[in-house]
Image: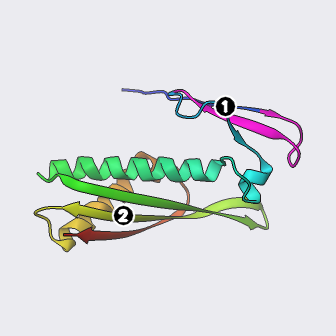
Amino acid sequence: MQIHRTGRVNWTGGLKDGRGAISTQSGALAEYPYGFSSRFEGVAGSNPEELLAAAHAACFTMALTLILGEAGLKAERLDTKAVVLLEQTDQGFAIPKIDLTLTATIAGIDDEKFQTLAGLAKANCPVSKLFNAEISLVAVLTA
């Protein structure tokens, strides 16, 4: 099975004075603004790194849901945050690290099993496999 999803960008101008707009196939983003200032200077608008972070958090959470289901478990709640580090190196900009933080409420699981299943989700979600970066995971099981 193959599934194709699309994203689209239009851009006008140079790097620092230019402007872009991001759109997704689903319409979740429709001509949403982004540019140098929203990526590097904290100005309102989107940027590739926050989109990667959202995609990774979503993928990891769905992978964990699958793994929990295969173990006969169902989460009451999963809250995942992904932080993508963009840093300038001698070779240009790179994304060397992504930190995932998960807080979960799951009945009938102990912390050892929870950590094992969360680790499997981190290693096996398709977005994790895409990145050539260190991916850390802090997983907290709540009552």
Which region is colored magenta?
Answer: 11-25
Relative to residue 10, is residue 50 drawn left or right? left
Q: Nearer the viewer, residue 111 or 123?
A: 111
* Residue in the image at 79% along x and 67% along y: 90
Q: Nearer the viewer, residue 116 or 79?
A: 79
- Secondary structure type for disc 1: loop
What's the mark number on residue 118? none
Asked if residue 59 lies in the magenta stretch, the reply is no
Where is residue 43 drawn, in percent x and y? Answer: 74, 54
> Along the polypeptide, which appears first: circle 2 or circle 1?
1
Q: Amino acid at mark 1?
A: Glu
Bin the neighbour count of mark 1 within 10 Å (Cα to Cα): few under 14, some 14-19, many 20 and up.
some
Quadrant in which residue 104 is drawn: bottom left
Residue under circle 2? 102
Question: In the figure, is residue 71 to the left or right of 123?
Answer: left
Image coords of residue 94 (percent x, y) = 68, 60
**Mark 1 highlights which residue?**
31
Which residue is located at x 88 percent, y 37 percent? Answer: 13
Q: Height in image: 121 above or below 25?
A: below
Residue placed furthest toward the front: 44
Residue at x 30% of width, y 56% of height = 78
